[in-house]
Image: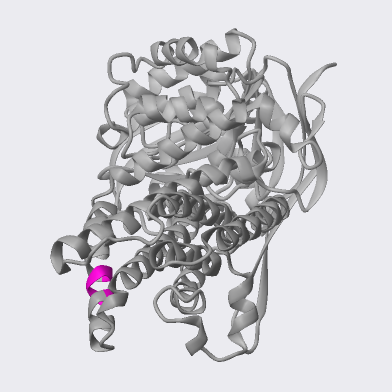
Amino acid sequence: MKTLRMLLMGMLFHLKHSSRSPFEIGSFVVVPIVQATLAVYLFRAAAEPQKLLQAAVGAGMMGVWSSVLFGAGGAIQMQRWQGTLEMLMLAPRRPVMVFLPITLANGAMGSYALLATLAWGRVLYGIELDFAHPFAFPVAALVTVLSLGAFGILLASLFILVRHANAFMNALEYPIWLLSGMLLPIASLPAWTGPIAAALPTTWGARALREATAGGAVWPSLGLCAVISAVCLGLGALALVHVERKARAAATLALA
Amino acid sequence: MDYAIEAEGLRRTYRSRTGWLRPRTTEVHAVRGVDLTVGRGELFGLLGPNGAGKTTTIKMLNTLLIPSAGTARICGFDVVKQTREVRRRIGYVFGGDRGLYERLTALDNLRYFAELYGVPARDQKRRIAELLELVKLTGRENERVEGYSRGMRQRLHIARGLLHEPEVIFLDEPSIGVDPVAARDLRATVANLAATGTTVLLTTHYMAEADELCDRIAVISEGEIQALGTPAELRHRADGRRVLEIEAYGVPTDALEDLQKLPGVREAAVEERGQVQVVTVQSDADADVQADVLRRLNGVRIGRVTSREPTLEDAYVAIIAAASRVAA
């Protein structure tokens, strides 16, 4: 109970902190419009207007991924700039309990990106929101967002160790969009990317959402997404213990 | 004796690598073997110039850095092997503007850290109210931190550091950049902490602060403790000396070397105080060096000249200067 309270309070705290940033608010407004537009024009150009909703969902997932990725990397880099990273590490808690609220908050912000992309798609481009599984869709969206929040822990462990986390963060955004089939079908990618895609929770999350939108077996994909993310959470928790120790040895917790 | 802080042979070396094709590793020995013990409830000062190794020492003691060599224990727990036990018992406050969530209120910050630092939910409201009162932020707790002055931030830092009622608190230059009134309030808060049984390790380079607050002081320079004792004991380091203070304008850079070579002169230093420079010359008590010093400063515009007994600050200068000479 205490743990749940801590996670919830921490998540709300970091959500509140992000919501006070003019930059974040600006991004929240602009990015979903750009993504909805991208989805619409890509598929109109391909003369597949019936897939507009799938495209919008895929574009929304891109937003979720960006939020988790930049959240895990950017937020931790931000904690370092603010001088709060050391204060967080001084908490007498397992490192995963300190960082999970941050990555969950980023997942929650990502869910907003997904909803906003769909809403703008409807308002600006008249995309019909007729989901094949209207009840499965919100469940799939929630589980996917939480799963990606957990996946963010594994990323966070990398970002604490690396002082210039931004370079890694930027390099990971587009490949995961592509590999997970968020916008383009995985089948159109080279065969060697298949195993990598299968190991990513983003691939299964995106697939579950696509199936909830266009029809198909939602739950197996969603289950795989949750299982892979749980494994990532476990690995991330172990990695954070190791990484925290390494960061203390290498003096990378502070900027100076 | 039951010690709150124990350090033996504490060392820390920073390594950095530059270059890709021909990587070069540089090493900086920030702390070179610190031994110290601090009793429970003691207010202990770590005094030294910038880059002396004060912050590195504190960060090894509070678990943020792993020592390159040596051991340290807080309330009997090893800082490397029993990290969580140590963290339950310590608070950390550092000087400057950073370290708080600026876009949120003081209350948001305190609530979050109370949760994070394991303050039981039923005690949080009472504890936060007590601390806001202690640091005189009651009534301002619902304002965003970004609107706070440096002094208010510092007080909030202290409140945050005390949330979980730590047995030992590390204060790393808490009064840096704080105005004199706020600094006086800070000193009163720190003195109260020690009076209520909290062990305090304070780093500062403000002599008056250390003199007023600390039971014992360790002077650290070049990564090593150069002197350790009560303020009165350290002051004795300057016994047998006189101090000549000269206000001057435009002292040439090589003048100090000349002054140091004068017979009877032990140390010479120059300090900028706004427009004016203050040349401080320590000499043997029985040597009258004033005429020689003024002769060497010929051509420099001279203001007030005073001769006085040495203070703790003069003892500190003497200790640091001696350490620098040995290191050179």
Judged left or right of residue B142, residue B17 is right
> Please, is residue A139 above or below residue A34 in the view?
above
> Please, is residue B181 above or below residue B250 in the view?
above
Q: Foreground: A216 or B236? A: A216
Q: Foreground: B217 or B38? A: B38
The count of marks equals: 0
- Residue B312 in the image: state x and y as whole percent: 56, 27
Q: Residue furthest left?
A: A124
Tell me the chief SS of the magenta region: helix
At x 28% / y 15%, what residue is drawn? Answer: B139
- Residue A91 in the image: state x and y as whole percent: 61, 35
Q: Is residue A36 magenta?
A: yes
Judged left or right of residue A113, residue A2 is right
The colouring scheme, among rainbow, by chain, secondary structure or one colour, is one colour
Q: Foreground: B85 or B305? A: B85
Which quadrant of the figure contains the N terminus of chain A? top right
Q: Is residue B90 magenta?
A: no
Residue B309 seen in the figure: no
> Please, is residue A41 above or below residue B180 in the view?
below
Q: Residue furthest right?
A: B1
Residue B3 seen in the figure: yes
User: What's drawn in magenta, residue-wise?
Assistant: A35-39
Q: Foreground: A78 or A46? A: A46
- Residue A200 in the image: state x and y as whole percent: 59, 69
At x 62% / y 78%, what residue is drawn? Answer: A196
- Residue B39 in the image: state x and y as whole percent: 75, 19
